Amino acid sequence: MNTISITIQNLYAPCGCACRYCLLQSCKKAEGVDYYRGKKIAEKFVEWSKAGNFSSTPMYTIAYCAEYPELFDNIAFNRSTGAATGFLQGNGIAIRDKGQTDHFVARLKSAGINMIDITFFGNQEYHDIFAARKGDYQFMLQLADSVARAGIVCAPSLVITEESKDMLEELILILRKITDISHIHAFLPDYRGRGNLTEDVRLTRESYMALPDTVKDRIQGSRYKTEQEWLSEGELPDYTNRALIISLRKDNIALLESMSCDEMVAYVEGLDDAYYQTIPSIHELAHLYGDPANTRLYRPRDLFWKWQKRYIKQNHIDIYDVTDERFCCTVRS
């Protein structure tokens, strides 16, 4: 198994939303440590990678959103190490008026942010309920408009489910007045975190085919197939790479600070190894749990996570969940 990236993630900034499918299950609270305490670990990893111990520079990221006093220090730090991408996720920040929003966006542009993703869940009523914050939809539109006017690429993403599918054509028309159609994309909820809560409203092949072209064209359709199709076509992948996420939390920071970088990497790789030595391969899980009648759409990794949860529950396995991004975790690819 090849480790291809390392992220130092500090669960430091409480999100203003509590989205139904949130990968990090933040629910408007934070579990991280002081920003600068976490930065010291990130700095240690940067020097470690510069010494030839790793092929790419680890990034220091702050979860759960971009609302924290040290945001611009974090942007500058990652730019200085070469780990920055110029990308920012806009959801969950504090609601601001138009002038405050324009000022905030101008600072982001000056700091080197060149693309901002803003996720929409449906029409105004549905979006606010989904995000668990009244006024979130209108603020996200205001933020999108401010981003586009500032000359930053505004890249709205649309969550598509059986519940929201009929709302998206109108939403796309609204967003096209703000940003280029090529920057708008739609996706199905990821299965990690609370993504399993959307299983009953997961888009089906029939629903996908019935979508208007303006919506269908915003989905990267080749990524998704039905469970039925993945099983019958025999194209489930073998995973050979993993990304490490070292999550800094109040309950593990002392342990991590006592370790060298090599020891931290070995620690998270060990958690990954232990988990996947206990869980059967995706092909074995497909044989155990694959449903050839299921016409809902997935990426292969969504099915892998879905079947893993079922295997663990059915066999009453008590194991560290290396797919839970609230803790030190991995993503296999």
Image (cartoon, rainbow, N blue to C red):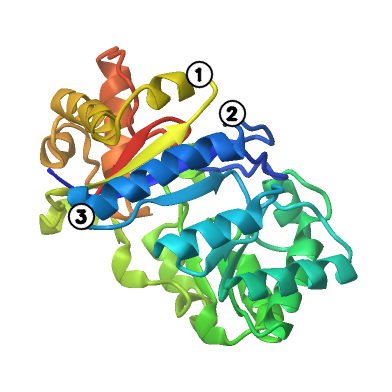
Q: Earlier in the sequence, mark 3 or mark 2?
A: 2
Q: Please identify the quadrant where the N terminus is shown.
A: top left
Q: Earlier in the sequence, mark 1 or mark 3?
A: 3
Front one among 17 and 113 = 113
Residue beneath the point at 17% across and 51% down: 231
Q: Do the residues bearing badges 2 and 1 touch, measured as CB atoms within 8 Å?
A: yes
Residue 19 placement: quadrant? top right
Residue beneath the point at 57% across and 73% down: 112
Q: Is residue 163 visible?
A: no
CA gap, disc 1 to disc 3?
Answer: 40 Å
Q: Is residue 145 visible?
A: yes
What residue is pinned by disc 3? 230
What residue is pinned by disc 2? 31
Mark 3 secondary-structure assignment: helix
Residue 252, x across and y down, in percent: 45, 21
Q: Earlier in the sequence, mark 2 or mark 1?
A: 2
CA gap, disc 2 to disc 1?
Answer: 9 Å
Front one among 17 and 85 = 85
Residue type at mark 3 is: Trp
Give the tally of numbered discs.
3
Residue beneath the point at 24% across and 42% down: 291
CA gap, disc 3 to disc 2?
Answer: 38 Å
259 w.r.t. 300: above or below: above
Mark 2 secondary-structure assignment: loop
Residue beneath the point at 14% across and 55% down: 232
Mark 1 secondary-structure assignment: loop
What residue is pinned by disc 1? 251
